[in-house]
Image (tube, grey):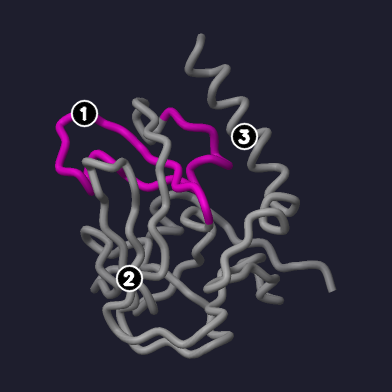
Amino acid sequence: MALLYTLSKIINCLTTEFIMTHIIHSPATYVKDTQTAKGKGVYAAKDYKIGDIIETAPVIVLLAPYATLPPRLKTRVFNWGDLTQSETPSSALALGFGSLYNHANPASISFNADVENQAMIYTAAQDIYKDQELTINYNGPDGHFCSEQDDWFARNNVILETPDT
């Protein structure tokens, strides 16, 4: 019951995403509407070189199997168990802008789990220019920026809705 209450609280926070992205500010990144079905995206506020750390985002680890999470939360979490090679099924909600990066394959940034500090580290996988959207590959094994498969949305029954015009 406590898990459901906690998940309910997290979902309520996610519904205020618009407010949060205007309060959370980073001098190196910013959030804006992509004007596509993706909705909001994270953008570079400066140039980055390959290998530069873009963000280190603390995570909230959820000790619940991914399949049991509410649909809205499934589109915002990472498979922490796989990333950390843990036998315990778990997901992680990245704070900061960590759970707002959109998908691309290949992506502009890669990510990896920092188990000791319970954080995700996002790193430039290519040279990135100011005002370029920062993307991750949702299919990338171990947070890699590129993958052969590109079916995350289909596997997770996620349908992108076209924004109102």
Q: Earlier in the sequence, mark 3 or mark 2?
A: 3
Q: Which residue is mark 2?
A: 123
Q: Residues within 10 Å of mark 1 (few under 14, many from 20)?
A: few
Residue in view at x 34 percent, y 53 percent: 120
Q: Residues within 10 Å of mark 2 (few under 14, many from 20)?
A: many
Magenta highlight on residue 89:
yes
User: Range of the magenta residues?
Assistant: 68-96
Residue in view at x 24 percent, y 73 percent: 148
| Relative height, residue 42 to residue 1 (above, below) | below
| Relative height, residue 94 to residue 159 (above, below) | above
Image quadrant of residue 72? top right
Q: Earlier in the sequence, mark 3 or mark 1?
A: 3
Q: Residues within 10 Å of mark 3 (few under 14, many from 20)?
A: some
Work out which residue is located at the far front of the displayed protein and give it: 27
Label 3–label 1 contact, CB within 8 A: no
Magenta highlight on residue 81:
yes
Q: Which mark is residue 11?
A: 3
Q: Earlier in the sequence, mark 1 or mark 2?
A: 1
Q: How many marks?
A: 3
Q: Which residue is mark 1?
A: 88
The three-letter amino acid code for the residue at tag 3 is Ile
Secondary-structure class at tag 1: loop
Expressed as whole percent of the image width and height from the top left, the position of residue 71 reads 54, 39
The three-letter amino acid code for the residue at tag 1 is Thr
Separation of disc 3 and disc 1 at Cα? 23 Å
Expressed as whole percent of the image width and height from the top left, the position of residue 36 reads 67, 74
